[in-house]
């Protein structure tokens, strides 16, 4: 089955916003939003609009940092980084530490020579302070986000449908990218792959959204009815709330994206899920139902933060209001419990 993702519901769009509007209207709404022209005044975007060589030379000016972690796939994968076969044990790419100049040189060669089926190259999540020192001062985001810029540099590639634990704003510098998003509640319809053997960190959907095998993954047709999509060009940005699934395709021979992840400590939620699989999933049904009641009362209920209100404040301890002190107590308590188990 072939899908034209451009036919899906479009992601909500706005023009560029200031820091106050972003925090007050965009982030708090917890909905994806495309911000057209949000970083159009970046010097990097100006260089990208002059062509592949111009942006390559601009990026090379920030050399001198640590080598980049580059994903390298053979031409036959068509730029889609994924598992090697149905056994889901191997990957169809390998990783290599590559200097910025060497990566840019190879991408520029592919672009200028018009290589029809190049190797797929993708430097992922290169933090600017370590890998491209000076980038953030030259290309400031201006949205009062306390997080480092991360650069993603490559050719025409696909990133499998995945989610992030944190809030995310992604800014397109060079090339065109299509983002296809699925709400968090579509989890069951996305057929999640292995939790402990992933492509690059987070678990991914096993379905190729551009060519889904609906015989093998029939519920994916339901996920598509909830999907949203948008194509971004240089200077555009997109806000993606935590836990929204997103598939990203880069179209051009040299693509550059910059993103910022920030937010609360949701990264601890996934280990908690894994521990729940270990500790709860295989219990007898009656015991599972009892633990569901505990979780509902102390974690998921609207008033869960008041579960210990009947106790004196000093005795609420790990169930008290959120604070650095409570986080420290929770971690110490958890460590002691895990050591005894």
Image (cartoon, rainbow, N blue to C red):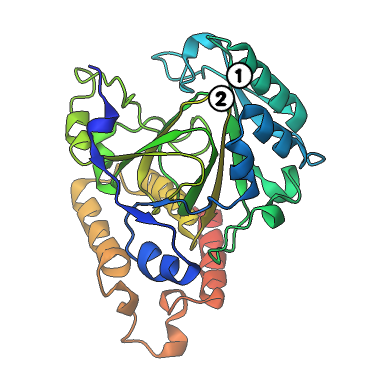
- Residue 99 visible in this rendered orientation of the protein: no
Depth check: give the residue in front, 183 or 334.
183
Looking at the rendered structure, which numbered label has been put on residue 155? 2
Work out whether mark 2 precedes mark 1 in sequence or the reverse, and give the earlier one.
1
Relative to 52, does residue 319 appear above or below in the rendering?
below
Who's the residue at 22% across and 36% down the image?
Answer: 223
**Residue beneath label 1, please?**
111
Depth check: give the residue in front, 112 or 190.
112
Depth check: give the residue in front, 115 or 273.
115
Is 72 displayed left or right of 89 in the figure? right
Name, please, the residue furthest toward the front. Answer: 50
Who's the residue at 30% across and 72% down the image?
Answer: 304
Question: SS at mark 2?
Answer: loop
> Can you give x and y, in whole percent of width and height, for residue 251 in the image?
46, 26
For the N terminus, the quadrant is: top left
Name, please, the residue furthest toward the right. Answer: 64
Who's the residue at 25% across and 47% down the image?
Answer: 185
Density class for disc 1 (Cα within 10 Å; few <14, some 14-19, many ≥20) is some
> Can you give x and y, in whole percent of width and height, for residue 23 in the image?
44, 68
Density class for disc 2 (Cα within 10 Å; few <14, some 14-19, many ≥20) is many
């Amino acid at each position: 089955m072939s899908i034209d993702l451009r036919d899906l519901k479009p992601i909500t769009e706005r023009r560029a916003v200031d820091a106050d509007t972003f925090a007050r209207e965009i982030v708090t709404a917890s909905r994806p939003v495309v911000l057209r022209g949000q970083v159009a005044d970046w010097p990097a975007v100006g260089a990208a609009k002059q062509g592949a060589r111009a942006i390559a030379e601009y990026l090379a000016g920030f050399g001198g940092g640590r080598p980049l972690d580059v994903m390298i796939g053979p031409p036959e994968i068509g730029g889609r980084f994924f598992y090697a076969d149905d056994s889901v044990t191997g990957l169809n790419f390998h990783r290599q530490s590559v200097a910025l100049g060497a990566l840019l040189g190879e991408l520029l060669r592919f672009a200028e020579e018009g290589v029809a089926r190049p190797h797929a190259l993708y430097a992922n999540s290169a933090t600017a302070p370590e890998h491209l020192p000076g980038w953030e001062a030259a290309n400031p985001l201006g949205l009062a986000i306390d997080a480092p810029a991360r650069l993603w540099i490559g050719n025409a590639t696909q990133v499998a449908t995945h989610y992030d634990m944190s809030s995310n704003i992604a800014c397109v510098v060079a090339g065109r990218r299509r983002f296809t998003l699925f709400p968090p509640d579509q989890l069951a319809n996305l057929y999640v792959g292995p939790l402990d053997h992933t492509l690059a960190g987070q678990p991914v959907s096993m379905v190729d959204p551009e060519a889904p095998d609906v015989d093998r993954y029939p519920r994916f047709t339901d996920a598509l009815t909830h999907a949203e999509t948008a194509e971004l060009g240089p200077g555009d940005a997109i806000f993606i709330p935590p836990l929204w699934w997103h598939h990203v395709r880069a179209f051009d021979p040299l693509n550059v994206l910059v993103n910022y992840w920030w937010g609360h400590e949701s990264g601890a939620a996934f280990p908690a899920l894994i521990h729940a699989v270990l500790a709860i999933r295989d219990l007898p049904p009656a015991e599972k139902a009892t633990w569901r009641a505990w979780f509902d009362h102390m974690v998921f209920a609207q008033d869960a933060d008041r579960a210990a209100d009947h106790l004196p404040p000093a005795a609420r301890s790990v169930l008290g209001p959120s604070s650095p002190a409570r986080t420290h107590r929770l971690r110490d308590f958890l460590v002691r419990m895990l050591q005894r188990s």
